Amino acid sequence: MSEAILLLSGPNLDQLGSRSPEIYGTMTLAAHVQRFRERAEKVGYSVEDRQSNFEGDLIEAVRDARGTYAAIVVNAGALTHTSWALADALANFEGVKIEVHLSNPAAREPFRHVSTLAGVVDGTIAGFGAESYDVALEAVLAVRGRA
C-alpha cells in the first residue's frame, strides 16, 4: 500500500464557497483540497481527490481504493445520514478511514444527528470549518503511528 490518501467528497460539496457560507464558510472545495494536499505532502503523503454528486461513484471510489491507499478521508455530505451502501464499502476498506465535516452535524437539524458511517470509520472530525481537514490529516498520522 502506498503513502497515499484518497480525499473523497460527496454531493453538493462542489458548491462550497457559495452554498450556505454562514454554515460552510467561503472556501471552495478546490481550495480545501489544495490546502489538504499541501499539508499531506509535507508529511510524505500524496493525495488523490474525488468528488461526486452520485452515491455509486463514491462507492466505486472506495472499492477501487482497496490495496492502493493508506487512508480515506471522507466528507460524504448528506450521504453521511442515509447511505448504508457507502458505509458497507468503507467497512471493506482495510486502511485508515476518517469522516470529516466542516460544520457540526450534531448541532444542526435532527436528521443530521445520525451518521451511517460512524460505525465503520476510525473517527469523525466535525465543526472546525477548514481546520476539520487539518485535524483529519493529524488523525490519519496518529492512527498510522506517525504522529
Image (spheres, rainbow, N blue to C red):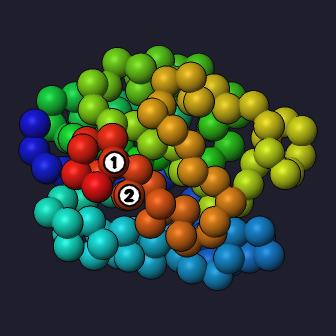
Where 83 sits versus 125, above or below? above
Residue 79 in which image quadrant: top right
**Which residue: 38% across, 76% down?**
35
Asked whether residue 83 is in view, the answer is no
Residue that extends furthest to the left in the rendered view of this protein: 2
Instruction: From the image, tell me which residue sits under label 2.
Output: 138
Mark 1 Cα within 10 Å, few/some/many (few <14, many 20+)?
few
Q: Mark 1 points at which residue?
A: 142
From the top left corner, tell me how far across and down residue 33 is, in percent: 39, 68
Residue in the foreground of this view, choosing between 4 and 19: 4
* Residue 63 vertical position relative to residue 92 in the rendered view, above or below: below
Outermost residue toward the bottom in this view: 26
Residue at image x 10%, y 36%?
1
Q: Which residue is drawn at 20% across and 66% down?
A: 43
Task: Determine the image quadrant of residue 24.
Answer: bottom right
Against 104, is 27 above or below? below
Q: Which amino acid does label 2 sit on?
A: Glu
Any mark on residue 30, and which? none
Counting from the top left corner in percent of width and height, residue 98 is at: 45, 43
- Evaluate if marks 2 and 1 touch, with contact meaning CB atoms under 8 Å apart: yes
Relative depth, front residue between 105 and 17: 105
